[in-house]
Image: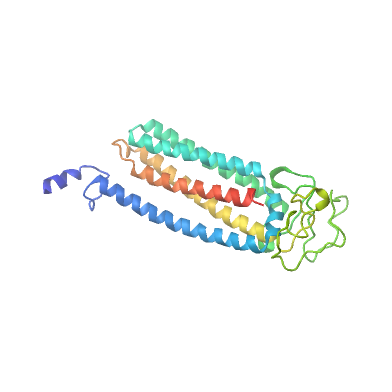
Amino acid sequence: MMAGHAETHHDPHLAHHFESPAQQYQSARLGMWVFLVTEILFFGGLFCAYAVYRANHPEVFIFGHHFLDKNLGALNTVVLICSSLTIAWAVRAAQLKQIRVLKLMLVLTLVCAFTFLGVKYVEYSHKWHAGLLWARSYAPQVHHGEGDHGAAPESVQMAPPAGSASEAGAGTAPAQPAPATAATPEHSNIAPAAIGPAGLADEAAGGGDEIVAEPKNAQTFFSIYFLMTGLHGIHVLGGIGAMFWLLVCARRGDFDTGHFTKVDMVALYWHLVDLIWIYLFLLLYLIH
């Protein structure tokens, strides 16, 4: 019995406190799932906060979604879905001892991850220059008629920030000005109607969700947007670091014997990162 147990330790990847590689793998998988549950609880709290603000301030989210580029969001969704395929393929390659395929799949996953961050940089850069930021940093400087990268559509009129002059500037008349008598309601928990929350949709424009005035506390949407997508971006950076580590492990021969636990654990984490983004895309970009 002792001799058999000693023979299992010839595997350089087997820690001394495990009796077999199978036991070590199951323990690692359980530990990773416990970690992923804590991540789900963490983002679950943020989704609850989103739901509360959404229920009580619907006009803020209807207004804010006009400034997000659905095409860029959809591109990032496709990129991350492709990365889930490549990281799953990397796990299979590690199981089959296909080291070259493993390295290729890890590199392709990294390319997808950097592409995702590049698209987010484009989005963040536009928000930064337009002043569509969080909390007190919110100071919109939107040029009407621009539709790229989440710019304000022509049907949206940005109200001047509190304390500023009533005129946005010479030569920048909006395509659809707000009525002179329109006023932002003090209480934003308003019942939805067929043409959208009261005071927001222009019935003459066709009953859509076009907004003719900036609602009060519009910065709430952008605070939630940057908080949730920013934290997700940090998790993407963590996944990139883990995949570089896997490439180092592959180069030194850690997977030559068919050992794939490390790759599988990183893949589980990356699948969660992809799944969270899909929910963010639906809630922030599409639902309005």
The colour mode here is: rainbow
**Frontmost residue, 192 versus 146:** 192
Q: With 55 as the anchor, is 82 left or right in this view? A: left
Q: Residue 227 or 242: which is nearer the viewer? A: 227
* Farthest residue, direction front: 194
Q: Position of residue 142 (x, y in %)?
A: 76, 51
In this rendering, the count of numbered labels is: 0
Query: In front here: 10 or 229?
Result: 229
Residue 190 point in image, percent of width and height: 71, 64
The relative height of residue 285 versus residue 87 in the rendered view (above or below) is below
Of 33 and 18, nearer the camera is 33
Q: Quadrant of residue 187?
A: bottom right
Q: Residue at x 41, y 44 (%)?
A: 245
The residue that appears at 77% across and 65% down in the rendered structure is 162
Report whether 100 appears left or right of 278. Answer: left
Residue 132, visible in the rendered structure: no
Q: Position of residue 154 (x, y in %)?
A: 79, 47
Q: Is residue 216 visible?
A: yes
Q: Position of residue 170 (x, y in %)?
A: 88, 53
Specify the quadrant of the image occupied by residue 75.
top right
For image coordinates 37% across by 34% down, the residue present is: 93
Q: Is residue 14 left or right of residue 133?
A: left
The residue sitting at 52% across, 39% down in the picture is 112
